[in-house]
Image (tube, helix red, strand yellow):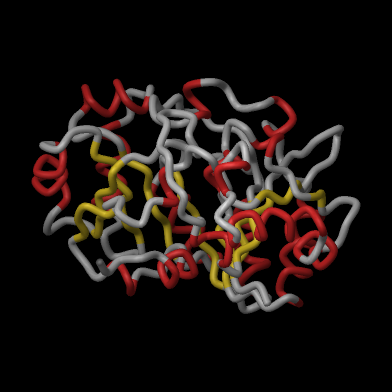
Amino acid sequence: MINHLNLELFGGCNYTCKICPQGIYQREKPFLTHLPFKFAKDIIEHAQMHGIKSVSLQGSGEPILYKKLKEIISFCKKLGLKSYITTNLSTKNVQELEELFDAGLTSIRVSFIGYDAKTYNEWMGQDKFHDVYDKVCAMYNYNISVNCIAIKKYWLDEYKSLFDNKVKFVVWNKHNWSGQLSQEESSEPCPKVSWPVLNVRAGGLDGHKGAVVPCCNVLGQDSKAVLGHLDVNTISKIWNGNAYNKFRKKHKEGKAHKIDVCKNCDQRSASRDALLYSNYDVKQRENHSVWLENYRLSK
């Protein structure tokens, strides 16, 4: 049973964030592509047959750059599925964003690094601080939240001054993108391995599309993590196939350190305090519902 789909519609991004492999290394070319519209609908429809109740439409790219995003959202609504996006919010105006909600979008989560124009531009690579901030505040009546990353400890207080009593927001510690930004040793299995979440990339290897990967954190080294391609295989064959089962078995046996994309990932550490602050009950937020059900919020 799979209850959530992370479906990447477009693998590229118009930002160059300093803590994201998209901005640091330039993502591998085969994954900088879009998912054909009909293929995207087929994946969603087939995933629903496996039990999904919700779809996140970003993967590791910028979903608003996908030309038929509104049509995909409408398709999810038609199937009775909740749909979410995580976006930098830079390329659409308020009216266009409202149209996405009218089409059936459940919620938007806005990526935000920086507490003023200078730090935002420095860490996200775009002079869009005021534009994005104004749009977020203007849409406070919609189901929208801001996803902040604290580069330094004092940034937490800066974010509180910026967003408290204005919009819903959370503040996280930065993570190391499966060991690409820093090295962290851990003998623990990753809790995400057992989650009923299907992660699909827009691109793939050898000209294929719809690559299945175990986790969104493999961005920047997607090619090392491909477990199969949905343009030539069914969800069932990949989800229950040898490659995925071997991957799960290594984690279960405490051998995750032998998997290249997992060995230095800080998401395996139970002691890591990822969530720093939220001005609302994070367990109740609509965005990434499956992720929140499984995330270890209690200590």
Q: In which quarter of the view is residue 60 placed?
A: top right
**At 13% from the left edge and 55% from the top edge, which residue is drawn?**
164
- Left or right, 260 with respect to 135, comes to right
Circle count: 0
Relative image position of residue 147 (x, y in whole percent) = 32, 49
Q: Residue at x 29, y 49 (%)?
A: 136
Q: Is residue 207 visible to the viewer in this orientation of the structure?
A: yes
Image location of residue 214, percent across then percent down: 63, 52
Is residue 63 among what the camera can see? Answer: no
Residue 184 location (% of width, % of height)? 40, 37
Q: Quadrant of residue 53?
A: bottom right
Percent x, y of residue 216: 56, 47
User: In the rendered image, which quarter contains the N terminus?
Assistant: bottom right
Please give the name of the residue rendered at 47% of the width and 41% of the height, measured from the top-left corner: 265
| Residue found 74% across the figure and 60% down from its top | 245
Name of the residue lying farthest toward the right: 232
Most foreground residue, 1 or 73: 1
Nearer to us in this view, 33 or 18 = 18
| Res 49 → quadrant | bottom right
Image-based side of 269 in relation to 212, left or right: left
Q: Give the camera-side residue of 2 and 247.
A: 247
Rendered view: 117 above or below 165: above
